[in-house]
Image: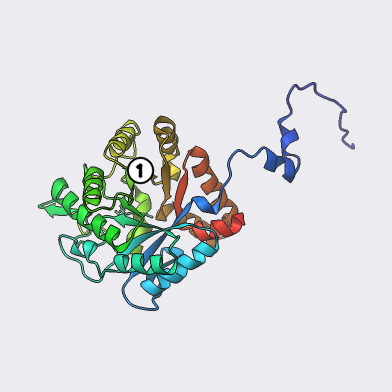
Amino acid sequence: MPSTIIPTTLRLARRHRRLRQSAGLRALVRETRLSPEMFIYPLFVCEGEGVRREVASMPGVYQLSVDEAVKETEAARGDGVPAVLLFGLPEHKDDIGSAAYDPDAPVQAAIRAIKRASPDTVVVTDVCLCEYTSHGHCGIVQGEEIVNDPTVAQLVRAAVSHAEAGANIVAPSDMMDGRVGAIRQALDERGFTQVTVMSYAAKYWSAFYGPFRDAADSAPKFGDRRTHQMDPANVEEALREVEQDIEEGADIVMVKPALTYLDVIARVKAEFGYPTAAYHVSGEYSMLKAAARNGWIDEPRAMLETLTAIRRAGADMIITYYAREAARAIG
Ligand code: PBG
């Protein structure tokens, strides 16, 4: 029996499919757009020359010596990405993280070299101690405790040394209390009134930082980061963190990670209307890479869908290891 289609026309006030029928119409009604201009590209800077070492758990991400970091920055600029975020991999680590403020350490050298080669690049630096301490914690440890106020003093030294090297934005990622105000004051006292503070304001205690700790060799040797990073269950607390950082002088506030905290991004943007950054972190990146390598997802589509969601939630800028790939895909 051949099946027949019954000719019917529903009387519908709205037909949503009308606006989806062609690429041109879909583009006209698109609400969220991505642009390479909103990406910040993280780089891991190590000692040496000509070093370009792929991070095993982050395909496409490399530990780079200063000369290679300059090349990578220029390539990113060529793709339309305006900003880089620098992390340091020092050879020397000690219990107070003193390499964090060594003027000759990889980050400080990279800031100078990048600003020399590419003065318009917005250079952002991560301010934390975990890459610099022998125990891998984000602060000074006394007994089992990460002590807040002495840690802030060290973070201030790191931020000032980044400003002295020429950083445009310092981004404290440690989650100690009071560090934004202390950094702002120290920068101002030294005449760095234009150096911008991007605060990792709502940074959660997340399982998605795993691959980063491989890349930055910053896994804690004992304990974890639960006493300073936020409980993933909380959002009201995130608003208090953001509010305090703004009061202390943060120019840009960040939510981190991104995908599992889209509601937090949306609330932060809606309640404060401040420039808001979201960090699409290492684990979020590596999950997509791993699935793509297994042929389980269409990587370019999954990448753009992810970044679009972060943008749609309210992020003005996105820190992502996909910055170059996404910039090229957007065209
Ligand atoms: C430093 C820092 C971390 C990340 C950014 N800055 C690691 C951590 O808090 O353990 C994670 C970034 C990523 O996973 O991509 N404290």
Residue that label 1 marks: 251
Q: Position of residue 77 (x, y in %)?
A: 51, 62
Residue 196 left/right relative to 309 = left
Instruction: Using the rendered image of the protein, determine whether residue 176 is visible from the camera's viewpoint.
Output: no
At which x and y percent is residue 102? 22, 66
Question: Which residue is found at the position 84% from the left and 25% from the top?
Answer: 9
Expressed as whole percent of the image width and height from the top left, the position of residue 246 reads 31, 38
Question: Furthest-front residue in view?
Answer: 191
| Residue drawn 36% across the image and 59% down it | 212
Q: Amino acid at mark 1?
A: Asp
Colour setup of the view: rainbow
Residue 154 drawn at (x, y percent)? 18, 55
Q: Look at 88% across and 33% down and name the residue there.
A: 4
Name the image quarter holding the C terminus.
bottom right
Check disc 1 and report its element: helix, strand or loop. Answer: loop
Q: Quadrant of residue 238?
A: top left
Work out whether 172 lies above or below 28. below
In the rendered image, the quadrant that contains the N terminus is top right
Q: Residue at x 32, y 42 (%)?
A: 250
Q: Nearer the viewer, residue 280 or 319?
A: 319
Q: Residues within 10 Å of mark 1 (few under 14, many from 20)?
A: some
Question: Which of 159 and 271 lies nearest the eye of the viewer?
Answer: 159
Counting the numbered discs, the total is: 1
Q: Nearer the viewer, residue 40 or 6?
A: 40
